[in-house]
Image (tube, rainbow, N blue to C red):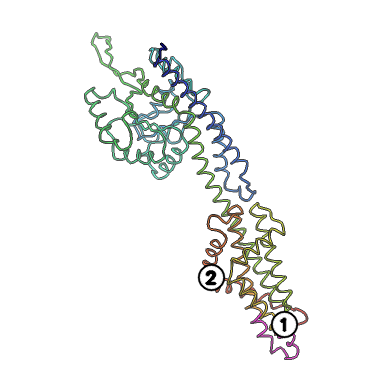
Amino acid sequence: MLSFDSSSHSEELELTLLSFQEITTEINYKKAQNSLRDLIRNLDLSDQEQAGLESDLSRLTEMLDKLEHSLVQIAAFGMVGRGKSSVLNALLGQEIFTAGPLHGVTNKINSANWQLTPEKLGNTEENLQTLTISTGIGKSKIQLIDTPGIDEVNGEVREALACDLAKQVDLILFVIAGDLTQVEYNALSRLREAGKPILLVFNKIDQYPEADRLAIYHKIRDERVKQLLSPEEIVMVAASPLQAQAIRQADGKLKVQRQRGQPQVDSLKLKILEILNREGKSLIALNSMLFADEVNEQILQRKLEIREEAANRLIYKGVMFKAVAIALNPVTAIDLFTGAIIDIAIIITLSRLYGIPMTQAGAIALLRKIALSMGGIGASELLATLGLSSLKGMLGLSVPLTGGLSLAPYLSIAIAQAGVAGVSSYAIGQITKTYLANGASWGPDGPKAVVKNILDSLDEESILNRIKSELQAKLRVNQSGINFEK
């Protein structure tokens, strides 16, 4: 008979699944690196667009550097006096961060790299075994970050600083030193919204009798943070414990002094290693991409705002140029031809502004599609051009014969015709801008929906009023021997 060793096959299956998970994690990590490289490479920002965005661009580069070096960032948050700096120093095994009871001791964000060694984890078999398992984080670097107290002065600025940092880091240590206060609960809730793993670090347990310590722990676990954290995310430590020691004085009397003892943070170290071993690279990749996506959205928003301002100026110049050209020209055929040429020029110039170069044929095809979708405005311009141009031409020719009496109606018709042409060109420019801002795509609604949305927002009267005074000023020139000034 064939024997079936279920335990052997179970272990083999577990190893296979673990190997598959590691491969998947590595693939996703590489994808995140490539995605961020492409994002930075394809930002396509002009010098003007880069102005004011240096900080955001620098942060994107920092995210890529973080991915390249597998940098895990762990930040400590908490109120003043809870021992944030002491916890980080205990993890490091040396006094790097300034610790003290006064407000403002930690008045800026500080960081230090953390290298784990067997000596720092202790020499128990369990600790060494856990350290061996933790080699799954490979060449990852761990950076510990200290932050100002959440109850410091200038709270709004510090809260914004904390929220911004929470979006960047991979793991949050929220340090308390007793039962949770309302301020701490509110801060913990806001940090929870960042979507990052959080360890609630109950520090200074050496200051409580064991019964009181456990009572506080159960109160926190079962009531205070039940909706925010699981029991596995709560760790008790004594980062800088005070121990009583009897010292015999010169007179022979014993005096009890409290001295600093060895930090008791091994449980926190092991919990951090457990998290990093299980999902360290995934955390780095996920958090880097989420933060990069947010920064990229801000950059793109700024980029579109700058380009939109430039596009609006360009459209307005095109509108004015077309309106003046139509107003001054009395020949119907030339009116139609000139108007189309100017609209095509607006489309081509806008395409260059948005980094989507377009040929003349492409611009004509886009103009035709826009014109068909515009319906009423396009028809109005055509009728106005055909009808008003003929009347304007006759009035222009009759100015010398009437002694200038036909000049007033000539100007009135010229301005009306120019206004219709200007509104049409404005609509075409805005529709083209929207099309190009969407990456030369109409989006899910199609061209007619885009056109309708833009046309619905147009105020024809205000556009006409906007250009009316400028048209009148420009029309007061000597054109074809006719003096438009009386």
The residue that label 2 is drawn on is 459
Residue 438 spot, x, y in % from top left? 58, 54
User: Nearest the camera: 271 or 383?
Assistant: 383
User: Could you classify mark 2 by the number of other residues whose Cα lies within 10 Å: few (under 14), some (14-19), or many (20 or more)?
Assistant: few
User: Could you classify mark 1 by the number of other residues whose Cα lies within 10 Å: few (under 14), some (14-19), or many (20 or more)?
Assistant: some
The residue that label 1 is drawn on is 393
Residue 250 spot, x, y in % from top left? 28, 9
Could you tell me the amino acid type at mark 2?
A: Asp
Image: 412 above or below 26: below
Q: Which residues are magenta?
A: 392-413
Q: Is residue 393 magenta?
A: yes
Q: Which residue: 60% across, 52% down?
A: 439
Residue found farthest to the right: 481
Q: Which residue: 69% across, 82% down?
A: 392
Could you tell me the amino acid type at mark 1?
A: Gly
Image: 360 above or below 265: below
Q: Is residue 112 left or right of residue 428?
A: left
